[in-house]
Image (cartoon, rainbow, N blue to C red):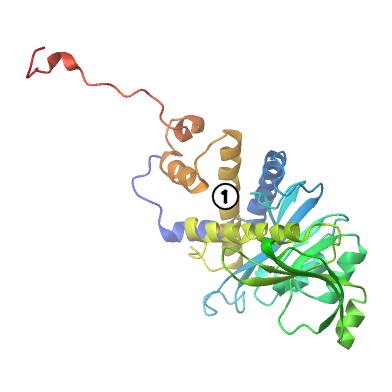
Amino acid sequence: MGLMAPPARSTLSDALNQRNWRIYHALAQRLIARARALYAPEPCVLELDASVYALDATTSYLCLSLFDWAPFSLHVGCHQAAHAAGPARRDPSLHPISDGKLHDVNVLDILPVQAGAFYVMGRGYVDFARLYAMHQAGAFFVTRAKRGMDARRVYSAPTDRASGVICDQRIVFNGFYAAKNYPEHLRRIRFKDPESGKTLVFLTNNTSLPALTIAALYKSGWQVQLFFKWIKQHLRIKRFLATSENAVKTQVWCAIATYLLIAIVKKELHLDASLYTCLQILSVSVFEKTEVSCALQPDRSPKESPNSANQLNLFEF
C-alpha cells in the first residue's frame, strides 16, 4: 500500500472504536447468502431431501477489568446450514454476539424453526420443553442424551451390532417434569463409534431414518466446531486491538467476513488448496498487482531441462 511502516496499534484501535460494527455485520450477512448459494449445489452426502442445520456456540474469555461491558465472557452462537445435504458446508449463519450469560439453550427461543428440517445440536441445547415445541412445529432434532436421564423403554427395533448400533428404542420419561415437557415417545439410539471406541446415546424425534444415518448426521455437525477452531487459530480472534464493545464486535465480524471471502474465492475458482493455504497466499499478495485467480492457481509452468550441449561426456560410445 506504500506505507513506510505498519500502522500503530492505537490507530487501529481508534478505527475499531469509531466505525459502527453493524456495517461489518451487514457485509457478513451478504457474504453468507452468497456462500450459501455457491455451496448448495454440492452433491448430497447423507442423501437427505431436507435442510440440515447444525447448532453450536463458542466462547472467548475476556478480562473483566478491560472488557467491563461483557461480564464473564464473549459468546458467539452459530448455526451452519446445509440445504438438501449434510451440514458440512462453509456458510455459517450467526446470531448476535452476546456476553457469556446467554446460555446455549436460550437460542432455541429466537431460532426460526423450519418445518421438515433437521437440527443437529449438542447436549447444551437439551431442554425437553423447547424440543417438544420444535417437534410440534414439524421439525426434527438430533442431539445427545444427558447422563442420568430417567426414562423407560417402550419398544426396541432389531439392530445389527456389527454396524455399531447397539440398540434402537422408543422411550418415555419417568420424571414428572420431563414427561410433562415432552409427553410423547422419543427415539433413543445407542451407538459405538468404531474409530474412538466411545459409546454415544442419541435422542431424536425422527422415526423413519436408519439409525446409522442419525449417527452420521450428528457426526457431520462437528463441522461447526471446526469452523470456530479455524477462526480462532488462523484469524487470531482472541487478540483484540481495542476493548470497547463496538471494537470487539467489529473485529469478530471482520474475521467472519474474511473466512467467507476465502470460502467464496475457493469455490468460484474451483481450487483444491485448503482454506488455510488460500489465506496465506492472499495475506502476502492482496496488495500486489496480480489477479487473485492467478495468485491462487498452482504453478503449472514447465520446468526447464538443463542444457546438455555444454556438458562433457566422460565416455564416448
Residue 95 visible, this angle: no
In the rendered image of this protein, does residue 66 appear above or below residue 46? Answer: below
Residue, x 52% and y 75% (percent of image)?
A: 66
In the rendered image of this protein, does residue 12 appear above or below residue 150? Answer: above
Amino acid carrying mark 1 in the image: Tyr
Please tell me which residue lies in front, 232 or 2. Answer: 232
Residue, x 72% and y 52% (percent of image)?
A: 81
In the rendered image of this protein, does residue 189 appear above or below residue 64? Answer: above
Q: Give the structural element (helix, strand or loop) at label 1.
A: helix
Please give the residue where the numbered disc 1 appears in the rendered image: 259
Disc 1 packing (10 Å; few <14; some 14–19; many ≥20): many
Query: The N terminus lies in which quarter of the figure?
Result: top left
Residue, x 58% and y 58% (percent of image)?
A: 226
Image-quadrant location for residue 75: bottom right
Apparent side of residue 217 relative to residue 17 in the rendered image (left or right)? right
Please tell me which residue lies in front, 316 or 101. Answer: 316
Please tell me which residue lies in front, 66 or 112. Answer: 112
Give the residue furthest to the bottom: 176
Q: Position of residue 137 (x, y in %)?
A: 91, 62
Apparent side of residue 307 relative to residue 109 in the rendered image (left or right)? left
> What is the total number of numbered labels drawn onto the structure image?
1
Image-quadrant location for residue 218: bottom right
Residue 75 visible, this angle: yes
In the rendered image of this protein, does residue 73 appear above or below residue 251? Answer: below
Q: Position of residue 302 (x, y in %)?
A: 36, 22
Q: Position of residue 271 (x, y in %)?
A: 53, 36
Q: Position of residue 311 (x, y in %)?
A: 12, 18
